[in-house]
Amino acid sequence: MDKIDQKIEAAAAPHTPQTTHREPRGHSGTRSRSAFRGKSFSRRDTPTIKNTVRKTEDIIPPIEGDNIRVIPLGGVEEIGRNMTMIEYKNDIIVIDIGFQFKDEDTPGIDYILPNTKYLEDNKHKIRGLFITHGHLDHIGGLPFLIDRIGYPKIYTRQFGAIMIQKRQDEFPHLQPLDIQVIEGDETLSIGELRIKTFPISHTIPDSMGLIIETPHGNIVFIEDVRVDNINGVPTEEEVEQYKRFKDMKVLMLTMDSTSVEKPGFSLSENVVIENLARFITETKSRLFIATFASQVERIIAIIQAAEKCGKKIVVEGRSMKSNIEIIKQLKLADVTNIIPLEDIENYPPDRIVMLVTGAQGEEFAALMRIANKTHKYVRLRPTDTVLLSASVIPTNFKSVNNLKDNLYRSGAKIVTYVDSEIHASGHGNREELKWIHQQIPYKFFMPVHGQHYMLCQHAELSYGLGHNKEDVVVPDNGSIVEIYDNGEKIRILKEKVPANLVLVDGFAVGNIQEMVLRDRKMLAQDGIFLIVVSINTKTGKLKKSPDIIARGFVYVRESQDLLTNTRMIIKKTVEDTTQGMNPIDFDMVKSILADNVARYLFQKTAKKPMVIPVVLGV
Amino acid sequence: MDKIDQKIEAAAAPHTPQTTHREPRGHSGTRSRSAFRGKSFSRRDTPTIKNTVRKTEDIIPPIEGDNIRVIPLGGVEEIGRNMTMIEYKNDIIVIDIGFQFKDEDTPGIDYILPNTKYLEDNKHKIRGLFITHGHLDHIGGLPFLIDRIGYPKIYTRQFGAIMIQKRQDEFPHLQPLDIQVIEGDETLSIGELRIKTFPISHTIPDSMGLIIETPHGNIVFIEDVRVDNINGVPTEEEVEQYKRFKDMKVLMLTMDSTSVEKPGFSLSENVVIENLARFITETKSRLFIATFASQVERIIAIIQAAEKCGKKIVVEGRSMKSNIEIIKQLKLADVTNIIPLEDIENYPPDRIVMLVTGAQGEEFAALMRIANKTHKYVRLRPTDTVLLSASVIPTNFKSVNNLKDNLYRSGAKIVTYVDSEIHASGHGNREELKWIHQQIPYKFFMPVHGQHYMLCQHAELSYGLGHNKEDVVVPDNGSIVEIYDNGEKIRILKEKVPANLVLVDGFAVGNIQEMVLRDRKMLAQDGIFLIVVSINTKTGKLKKSPDIIARGFVYVRESQDLLTNTRMIIKKTVEDTTQGMNPIDFDMVKSILADNVARYLFQKTAKKPMVIPVVLGV
């Protein structure tokens, strides 16, 4: 018993170098990097995330003279977690602080954050945090990161400010935020920099771009953007808006690359709004409209269209209700025609428009509950019409298809963006992006927002307009883009600021979860197979037949033989290994046990569960 | 010790009704349905899959008179695992026997199969298995199911026959197959039925439709199908092909619904082939073409185009090589210009076309290995051109994007179906399907192949052509579609044949894996937390501090407190529970332990790992 007392992970079999154990054919418990990996918790070392990484100043050469650094901390190798910082002399300004949703590579994770290590080490230089608009991929990281970067002052327009504050209220342990609400066309002095804002078109009110004035020229920072257009011709408002750049000395342009792969101009939101208004006016029974709660401008238009033809709006879904509260607060629409769900039966069906969340098939969103008949009050009827006013985010493909299956089972009429023009993107297609490029006479270009290949395609678009390859940079997360030589040249340094994944996993926020994720992925494939063995420390014999616990492995109840034989292998392995051994090397026993069992299970089942032996001496 | 000897799952805490333990806030080990759930393996019951389901004849009313039953066993609630059976009097014929690939709902699973329980119970009636073409969603289930349904004679055209035989060779434990190779235009007498075959257009040679002659008229069975067309006008060959139906008495039509949602006609494969040929002719350096190995007709065209301009073909990827072997064997193309990979450097770059697998970003496919620099020989160069001659299957969206990122990092020129017309689908769009409908004067219609909503849209297409709702049936997997009343009427019976999931998981094939899957999904979210406790059976005290093993849970090394406190909770729970207890009720101890620990962990981490206590009496 002396070898295994009081230790966590008594069960894991560290590879003791003196043993001659064989490698298992596949992965087994002995090979997995676990949270506890071969570590006694009686040792009082409690490394924090910060301690595990060197101070960035040891790695990154200091900024020199009047060079300018632009460092994307997130959003340039993925769609989401947008965050960029600009460093000039002793000042840093930060633009956006978003998060990214989990995907199949991050099971169990809540959100993925930009890595702010460099900012944390340099927070004394941060002069402000600009938020371009209130979408979660631009503000979602704030509650998790604002404390780390020292609560800088936040500059944003009204809608974004309320979105931020509403979210912040859900994190009562944080300090109050210092938010300065600014206009869409304002000039601010921040440290040694002057920053101008300008309004841009997106799908949420109060979206803005930034013009950061530097001695070498202006950096024009455009995040999510589309161009209002009529059949591919930008509207007069757009033309007017971009005239400001006509004779500007623009040092560098950055811009959204999300939809660069899509040809032409995107469908105009105006067309979408007209079509929705027509459905609202003409539908003779209950009409359900599902859209993203983040499509605030569309939601406003829907409320107005219903108002116009005397229909009542019922709102279902938390995020939708929350955004409608903001619309109400800011008086962006007359919301007197919104009625509570309970009153729905007081009106004839042809007076009802239901505005719901769940167009992406989100498991617990309003429309999904309605479609799969788990909604408390609302059931679909064959006379209803349902508009899915949203495109399908590819990672939601399966859930949207399931949603559509369920909707069709109700017999209701289903309309989607595939058959009717009832959705437009907030991200400009290739020709819209090109049009913006043509309005801004820039020297350097840095595409942002999107996967690497999208940034490359956006760079190619810039080459196509006559820009030189050496004036265009395609950054990675953490790339230090530096404008040097009096603003004449641009380069990406070989050094990078830390950019490894920072994950929100329950209450844990950090980057060490990557090891935990590996385990989760393994467990999801083949499960876990635990063996509990009691050994007589004197004789090396088993005290009793081993206990076996399996989860997520094959359905072994059908295969008695598998278990009987596994027990025999365990017994033989232990007794062979301990023969003549005094004292018993428990680590060695565990290691060989894990290997032998893993190999046998793979042979018999073609599965590779994590095999974890717990060996107790009695 | 007496209570816990020799049992598997000594650790799980069954809910003993006499205890007063509280429900955990979330799931914990005590609530999970495990493979071993509260079951001693010393009891020698070994249920097989068959024993768990009643004989279908107890449930399904027997077929009467000259009614005809058409029963889709798979493929009508999903894309994949296509299989349908037709029953008439004492005869059953089966059409296709495909599988479906796993998705996020089936972690660790290899394939999903159609449920053949009804056929297994009625295998004496099976007169033949028809294979419409050699794609895996039509033949993939064969090695797993052919034994169960009693090795019926297989009827298929030449290309499919070879595909089947090649796959079968990988399953040496099976009996030899009885395959009758038939022509594309042949008449067979099978039992009381006469069956005619006819060629149809798809993406693999030797695709065919079936005409099943019944006393009430013909059932025209069309699986995967497209219509060759020039800008939306069907080619003369197609027109000619479908003329056979002009004056036919068609009782029922069934047809592929996969692409019914897509408007218009699909791009013609001829255009794709022309474009690929132009790339092959005009590219002045190495050209990589990635496509599905199943796109056999396209592969043949690529080989021919390369031959024509004197370029050599190098083939990489197992499935591609395998299909090229068949092309060679059937002399479908002159393959003398195919050279082995080792010879690639013997030719100038502008003489090389590499034909590779991996256009869907499959982890170990040729192109992925080339892109992420793990391929043994081939590295991309900035002068290379890569054609992704495939659309993106939505579930592969992320891996394809990662592939594109990696390809762009090489500096090579990347061409996809988004920017160039280098891919066309094998499944007809809405207008193609409509055109086929218009060629066939049918009475009843049953859409197949696709999710439920696709089938509904296909049904709507039929209504739009003037068919009555009562003449169109939208089946589910297992639906018994019956044509009765002398062929006058069609209905779906309220009874269904078994249709629950049958999964291939390593060597296991069955439907009980669903429980295992639930565990895998839980493990993937929050991992597992194991507690090993030794109790002195006399005093109820812990013999030593508990051991804890966690996998896929949070990174607890950072949080000593969590573990210290968890150990305290374990100790207190055990000692409180066992106080005055004689003998100790181990099940009760485990149950309360699991609850208390799960609750504490959730409070502290917001995660809900499976908590499994192992309690040993010493």
Image (tube, coloured by chain):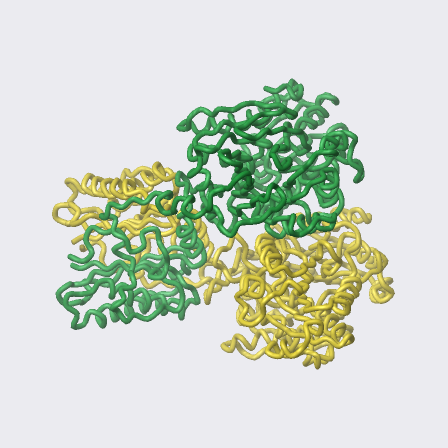
Chain colours: A green, B yellow
**Residue closer to the observer: A284 or A471:** A471
The spot of residue B362 in percent (x, y) is 57, 61
Say if B399 sits above or below A270 in the image: below
**Residue closer to the observer: A117 or A564:** A117
Quarter holding the C terminus of chain A? bottom left
Question: What residue is at 26 percent from the left and 69 percent from the top?
Answer: A19
In the displayed structure image, the side of residue A535 where residue B62 appears, left or right = right
The answer to which image quadrant residue B485 occupies is bottom right
Would residue B459 be visible to someone looking at this image?
A: no
The spot of residue A193 in percent (x, y) is 56, 30
The answer to which image quadrant residue A176 occupies is top left
Question: What residue is at 67 percent from the left and 63 percent from the top?
Answer: B386
Quarter holding the N terminus of chain A? bottom left
In the displayed structure image, the side of residue A374 where residue A208 appears, left or right = right
The answer to which image quadrant residue B244 occupies is bottom right
The spot of residue A440 in percent (x, y) is 71, 38
Question: What residue is at 86 percent from the left and 62 percent from the top?
Answer: B246
Say if B165 sits above or below A324 in the image: below
The spot of residue B606 in percent (x, y) is 39, 39
Number of callouts? 0
In the displayed structure image, the side of residue B355 where residue A517 appears, left or right = left
**Residue closer to the observer: B373 or A480:** A480
Would residue A186 be visible to someone looking at this image?
A: yes
Say if B244 sits above or below B552 in the image: below
